[in-house]
Amino acid sequence: MVEHLRTTLHTFVNNYQAVMWRLRECSLNDEQLGNAVGLSGNAIRNRRSKPGVWKLSDVERLATHFSLPVTACNQLEQALKDLPKTMRTLPSDERRRTERQLLTKIAQLELYNQSDWPVKCLLKMHQALYKGF
């Protein structure tokens, strides 16, 4: 379970970096890009200055706009949606160890699954999983 999430997160992070590179090279201004991906110009401006504020769904929309694959976003989203249910089936000591490893409790996983995952949390989780290996 954790190994699958680790590899899925790694693939997403590589895709995210490609999207951010394309974003830096993009000739559209904030308003134009916002219109293209369904966000306000202010949201684009804010996210450009604070890249960790991007959401998983934003990265997917940007990848689509830049004609990059969205498979990594979709696979990560599915893995994250399945994670709380899987973790609930673990013995309590193993579940707590997994929560510590992911730096996220089940309740937080469910909350982000219902709203949207901030990229900064995904990057933090990715870093924690790679630090442990």
Image (spheres, grey):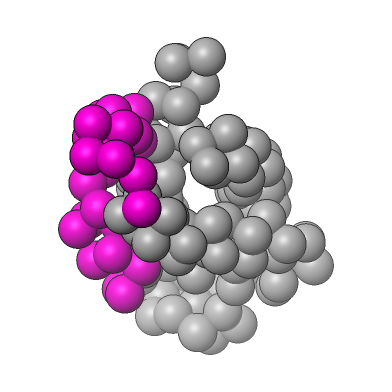
**Residue in the foreground of this view, choosing between 133 and 118:** 133
Residue at x-position 39% and y-position 25%: 128
Residue at x-position 38% and y-position 61%: 85
- Residue 7 higher or lower than 30, as above or below: above
**Percent position of residue 82, x then y:** 47, 62
**Percent position of residue 93, x then y:** 23, 31
**Percent position of residue 105, x then y:** 22, 46
**Residue in the foreground of this view, choosing between 112 and 94:** 94
Magenta span dominant secondary structure: helix
**In the rendered image, is residue 103 in sight?**
no
**Residue in the foreground of this view, choosing between 98 and 29:** 98
Q: Range of the magenta residues?
A: 89-115
Residue 39 falls left or right of residue 89 = right
Give yes or no for residue 109 being in the magenta stretch.
yes
**In the rendered image, is residue 1 in sight?**
yes
Give yes or no for residue 79 being in the magenta stretch.
no
Residue at x-position 19% and y-position 58%: 107
Q: Quadrant of residue 121?
A: top left
- Residue 29 higher or lower than 126, as above or below: below
**Percent position of residue 42, x then y:** 33, 72
